[in-house]
Image (spheres, rainbow, N blue to C red):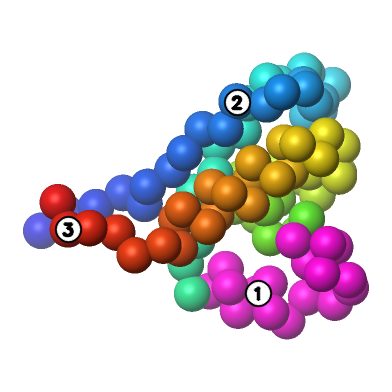
Amino acid sequence: MASKPRPTETIELTYEVEIDGVSVDSLTMRRPTVRDQMIADKAKGTDVEKAVKFFANLCEVPPSTIEALDTVDFTRLSEVLQDFQSPQSPT
């Protein structure tokens, strides 16, 4: 039986950011695993610094990319994460 790919969601950014010198207008976040949560829980720093590292991991971008986001886009990442963590109805 083939494993089911982890769900992702593409977040359209209100304000572009640069990744390796290239402007991007969206980020794709994957659904977190327990391992992702454990890594985030062990991270050092403020709650915002931990969130930056967590989102960078889930979006597979450097933390500096998340740090460069406008706060409206950072809030959108938080909303997508909450959606991922909400109970899903069976399909």
Residue 72 in view (yes/no): yes
Instruction: Please state the extent of the stretch shown in magenta in the rendering.
Output: 35-51
Q: Quadrant of residue 65?
A: top right
Q: Residue at x 24, y 52 (%)?
A: 4
Q: Nearer the viewer, residue 90 or 20?
A: 90
Q: Is residue 76 above or below residue 57?
A: above
Secondary structure under tag 2 reads: strand
What residue is disc 2 on? Answer: 12
Q: What's the CA distance linking mark 3 and mark 2?
A: 27 Å
Mark 3 vs mark 2: which is more N-terminal? 2
Q: Is residue 37 above or below residue 14?
A: below
Q: Position of residue 56 (x, y in %)?
A: 70, 50
Q: Position of residue 51 (x, y in %)?
A: 74, 61
Q: Residue furthest left?
A: 1
Q: Nearer the viewer, residue 78 or 5?
A: 78
21 sits left or right of 76 in the view: right
Q: Residue at x 17, y 58 (%)?
A: 90
Mark 1 vs mark 3: which is more N-terminal? 1
Residue 60 in view (yes/no): no
Q: Is residue 56 above or below residue 13?
A: below
What's the amino acid at mark 3?
Answer: Pro
Secondary structure under tag 1 reads: helix
Q: Residue at x 47, y 39 (%)?
A: 9
What's the amino acid at mark 2?
Answer: Glu
Q: Is residue 31 above or below residue 65?
A: below
What residue is disc 3 on? Answer: 90
Q: Quadrant of residue 41?
A: bottom right
Dominant SS of magenta comes to helix
Q: What's the CA distance linking mark 1 and mark 3?
A: 28 Å
Q: Which mark is residue 81?
A: none
Q: Which mark is residue 39?
A: 1
